[in-house]
């Protein structure tokens, strides 16, 4: 069952396994040591752990260089900096250009929260080859994620059941079951990861990044944040404004919203993306195989989902494609225009009784590999969001809000409204209604908003600019589709971002790329 923030998750992480055929724990061995004095031991990267999504070790870079991995020790509890430590997994590709042209390290966070940077950066490293000419490209598994003392909740078999459940209850019995399943999941997180749950807030991850800056030997943090990574970047800038170097925020989270407002915004965003998908299919010169008009496409999807609510169809054996899995798969495909062909194929097959493609898309969103193993993206996502977000929404409140969510999106409204109960029974109180990202005194931050972004709606970019404070942020607009702008390969966007990160040239405020 998706929750609103997990639908915010970085599609980049999920696409690594789309349709494709040594956890570092808590310890006390370095109590009393100065963490900034540690030296990293870089070695060839191993294959990703199950918690990071599994698969093979990263392939060498085009010039033959290998990706290197290391573990950085950080305080488990930042209020006790000389207490127990955890290991944070890092990955890097050393700068490819001349040594005298090197600027420093460029740290990436691809979003989630819960996405593994150690697996994502190598998977998309070629996309950032230009930036590598002057930077070591660096990413990491944030605390609670992957190999960085990853949060554990339910087993793989339990997660299969969890993601098959009815996430949009229509009666009292279904509502009771949904709430019981959510409570069971949250209890498993507390049982299996009790020590980590209070220590995975975004403020903790931001402090980790400042330690990382120092251990990497940089005076300033040069940073590229995507999706939730923009929220993390904003929190970092608030805590350490004088340490901000050249920073880019892409696919921008609205930092002024509560989790309820974020869910409602996503309902509107995914509905807009669905509208754009339907318009695109019916505007082609060849016949659209899933509907005669845009409205016909949406009507047929609604009819399919209603049918699946009571009668699932075969998915990936032995699992059935349920209403929840189908909705989740549709949402995943809307993250990128590159996926629209898969969505068309998946819908066409589902209308004929075959749910394999939509289920593969859903599995990709949920971090499930072909062998049935799950990464810990769901566990980490829930843990981080519930530790960050103060509001707790009871079921009765959600039911009162259903009409508003349905008005925002007939397809995704119920789905996102009911996901608000995710943190209701969480063991750790949330920190705040929304993050503080005010960053007076920071170096310029380039904020890139995409008008067609479903997961982080375009309006969030302007809200981030305003919240960072006067004279800090410069906004750039991309008139496009999908989640994020830089990886759309739009030359205007990439020229502006590269120009700032490589040469310090800030584009004119209000620049528009299309």
Image: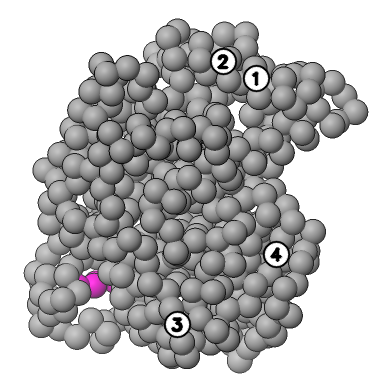
Q: Answer whether residue 403 is magenta in the image.
A: no
Q: Is residue 437 visible?
A: yes
For image coordinates 49% across by 61% down, the residue present is: 254
For the residue labelled by badge 1, is the local secondary structure a helix, a strand or a loop? helix
Marks 1,3: beta carbons within 8 A: no
Q: Which residue is mark 3?
A: 439
Q: Residue pushed farthest right?
A: 285
Q: Which residues are magenta?
A: 71-75
Q: Which callout, 4 or 3, points at the residue further toward the start of the chain?
A: 3
Q: Which residue is mark 4?
A: 477
Main secondary-structure element of the magenta-colored stretch = strand
Is residue 259 depicted above or below 130 in this figure? above
User: Hey, which quadrant is residue 493 in on the image?
Assistant: bottom right
Label tally: 4
Q: Nearer the viewer, residue 131 or 431?
A: 431
Q: Quadrant of the C terminus?
A: bottom right
From mark 2 to mark 3, how far is it between C-alphas?
Answer: 47 Å
User: Looking at the image, which is closer to me, 293 or 42?
Assistant: 293
Q: Determine crowd level at label 1: few under 14, some 14-19, many 20+ residues with C-alpha closer than 10 A.
A: few
Where disc 3 sits, the SS reads: loop
Which mark is nearer the camera, 1 or 4?
Answer: 1
- Quadrant of the rendering where the N terminus is positioned: top left
Q: CA distance from mark 1 to mark 3?
A: 46 Å
Residue topped by disc 2: 304
Q: Is residue 435 left or right of residue 111?
A: left
Q: Position of residue 504 (x, y in %)?
A: 65, 86
Mark-to-mark CA distance, 4 and 3:
22 Å
Sequence-wise, the earlier of marks 1 and 3 is 1
CB under 8 Å between callouts 1 and 4?
no
Residue at the spot of label 1? 299
């Amino acid at each position: 069952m998706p929750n609103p923030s997990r639908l915010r998750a970085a599609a980049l992480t999920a696409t690594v396994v789309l349709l494709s055929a040594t956890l570092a724990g808590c310890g006390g061995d370095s109590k009393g040591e100065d963490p900034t004095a540690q030296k990293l031991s870089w070695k060839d990267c191993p294959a990703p752990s199950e918690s990071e999504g599994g698969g093979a070790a990263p392939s060498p870079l085009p010039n033959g260089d290998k990706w290197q991995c290391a573990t950085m020790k950080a305080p488990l509890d930042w209020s006790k900096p000389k207490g127990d430590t955890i290991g944070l997994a890092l990955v890097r590709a050393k700068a490819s250009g001349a040594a005298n042209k090197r600027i420093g390290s460029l740290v990436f966070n691809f979003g989630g929260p819960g996405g593994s940077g150690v697996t994502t950066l190598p998977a998309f490293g070629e996309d950032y080859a230009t930036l590598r000419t002057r930077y070591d490209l660096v990413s990491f598994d944030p605390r609670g994620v992957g190999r960085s003392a990853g949060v554990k909740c339910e087993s793989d078999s339990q997660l299969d059941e969890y993601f098959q459940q009815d996430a949009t209850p229509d009666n009292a019995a279904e509502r009771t079951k949904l709430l019981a399943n959510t409570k069971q999941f949250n209890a498993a997180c507390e049982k299996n990861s009790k020590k980590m749950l209070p220590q995975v807030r975004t403020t903790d991850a931001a402090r980790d990044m400042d330690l990382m800056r120092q251990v990497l030997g940089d005076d300033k943090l040069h940073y590229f944040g995507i999706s939730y990574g923009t929220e993390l970047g904003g929190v970092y800038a608030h805590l350490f404004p004088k340490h901000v170097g050249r920073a880019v925020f892409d696919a921008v989270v609205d930092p002024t919203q509560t989790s309820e407002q974020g869910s409602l915004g996503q309902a509107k965003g995914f509905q807009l993306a669905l509208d754009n998908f339907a318009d695109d299919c019916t505007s082609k010169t060849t016949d659209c195989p899933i509907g005669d008009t845009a409205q016909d496409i949406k009507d047929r999807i609604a009819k399919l989902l209603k049918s699946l609510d009571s009668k699932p169809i075969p998915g990936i054996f032995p699992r059935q494609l349920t209403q929840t899995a189908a909705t989740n798969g549709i949402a995943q495909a809307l993250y990128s225009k590159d996926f629209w062909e898969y969505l068309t194929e998946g819908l066409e097959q589902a209308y004929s009784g075959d749910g394999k493609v939509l289920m593969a898309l859903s599995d990709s969103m949920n971090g499930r590999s072909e062998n049935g193993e799950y990464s810990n993206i769901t566990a980490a996502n829930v843990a981080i969001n519930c530790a960050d977000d103060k509001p707790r929404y009871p079921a009765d409140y959600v039911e009162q809000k259903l009409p508003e969510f349905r008005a925002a999106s007939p397809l995704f409204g119920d789905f996102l409204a009911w996901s608000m109960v995710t943190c209701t029974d969480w063991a750790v109180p949330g920190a705040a209604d929304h993050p503080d990202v005010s960053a007076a005194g920071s170096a310029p931050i380039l904020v890139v908003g995409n008008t067609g972004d479903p997961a982080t709606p375009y309006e969030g970019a302007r809200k981030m600019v305003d919240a960072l404070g006067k004279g800090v942020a410069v906004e750039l607009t991309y008139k496009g589709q999908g989640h994020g702008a830089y990886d759309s390969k739009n030359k205007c966007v990439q020229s502006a971002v590269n120009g700032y990160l490589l040469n310090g040239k800030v584009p004119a405020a209000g620049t528009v790329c299309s």
